[in-house]
Amino acid sequence: MPPDRQLNRICVFCGTNPGSRPGYGLAARELGRALAEQNIELVYGGASVGIMGELADSVQEHGGHVTGIIPQQLREKEAAHTGIRNLIVVASMHQRKSQMADMSDVVIALPGGIGTLEGFLEVLTWGQLGIHAKPAAILNVEGYFDALTGFLDHAVREGFLTKAHREAIIVETDPAGLLDRMRAYTPTEGEKLMGRTHR
């Protein structure tokens, strides 16, 4: 059995809105506490509001380290988090996503909107193409991602997604269980198709 994967930094895509249920923010705070307690650095979108803010604040409140990455044009719109130790301002959304992924060992999606899904699915696609072999996971809070996981199952049945690629997406409802499964993740074997410079 291979040794557990080292988790030094985790990239989290999540919303700049709080959502309609208190459970979303509570789950973000619980994940933040777990990251800090396990000495795992958070890499996220750099905002101080919504689920993003709850997550970053929780990591820091429990003694953890946070790196935020935000495009220049969104510093005001997304209320850049000036209270974190490391805020990186970049030129574009693509640079934000690619830098978040490059800095991290794994990628997680928490509840969020179109931007959250777009970022997570793009990194997921890079993995499917062989650009990286990092695990990708969904923290399914309050059943928020049920429709997405149902769609992925539908894509397998309809022949647009392989069963192996579907099973590689870790889905958990508990932050601690999610981190445990990410440590135990073994990438799907296969020849690399591309390198990161081709994404």
Image: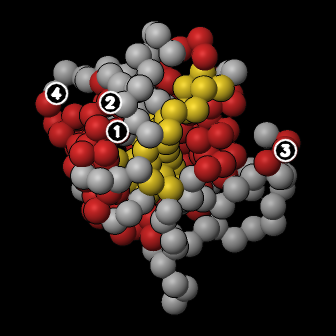
Which of the two marks, 4 or 1, is nearer to us in this view?
A: 1
Mark on residue 197?
Answer: 3
Q: Earlier in the sequence, mark 2 or mark 4?
A: 4
In the rendered structure, the answer to whether residue 197 lies left or right of residue 82 reads right
In the rendered structure, the answer to whether residue 33 lies left or right of residue 159 reads left
Query: Is residue 198 or residue 28 the one in the foreground?
Result: 28
The picture places residue 176, in percent across and down from the top left corner, at: 28, 62
The picture places residue 196, in percent across and down from the top left corner, at: 79, 48
Which of the two marks, 2 or 4, is nearer to us in this view?
A: 2
Which residue, given by chain and number where applicable, does mark 2 sit on? 53
Which residue, given by chain and number where applicable, does mark 1 sit on? 56
> Could you tell me the amino acid type at mark 1?
Ala
Real-space CA distance between mark 3 and mark 2, rounded to the nearest whole angstrom: 31 Å
Question: Would you say the residues marked 4 and 1 are in contact, meaning their CB atoms lie under 8 Å apart?
Answer: no
Residue name at image x 38 percent, y 63 percent:
39
Few, some or many residues within 10 Å of mark 1 (<14, 14–19, 20+): many
Which residue, given by chain and number where applicable, does mark 4 sit on? 21
Few, some or many residues within 10 Å of mark 4 (<14, 14–19, 20+): few
Query: Is residue 76 or residue 193 the one in the foreground?
Result: 76
Which of the two marks, 3 or 1, is nearer to us in this view?
A: 1
In the rendered structure, the answer to whether residue 34 lies left or right of residue 70 reads left
Real-space CA distance between mark 4 and mark 1, rounded to the nearest whole angstrom: 19 Å
> Could you tell me the amino acid type at mark 2?
Gly
User: Dot 2 lies on which element?
Assistant: helix
Q: Earlier in the sequence, mark 4 or mark 3?
A: 4
The picture places residue 95, in percent across and down from the top left corner, at: 69, 30
User: Dot 3 lies on which element?
Assistant: helix
Few, some or many residues within 10 Å of mark 3 (<14, 14–19, 20+): few
> Could you tell me the amino acid type at mark 4?
Arg
Real-space CA distance between mark 2 and mark 1, rounded to the nearest whole angstrom: 5 Å
Q: Is residue 127 above or below residue 198?
A: below
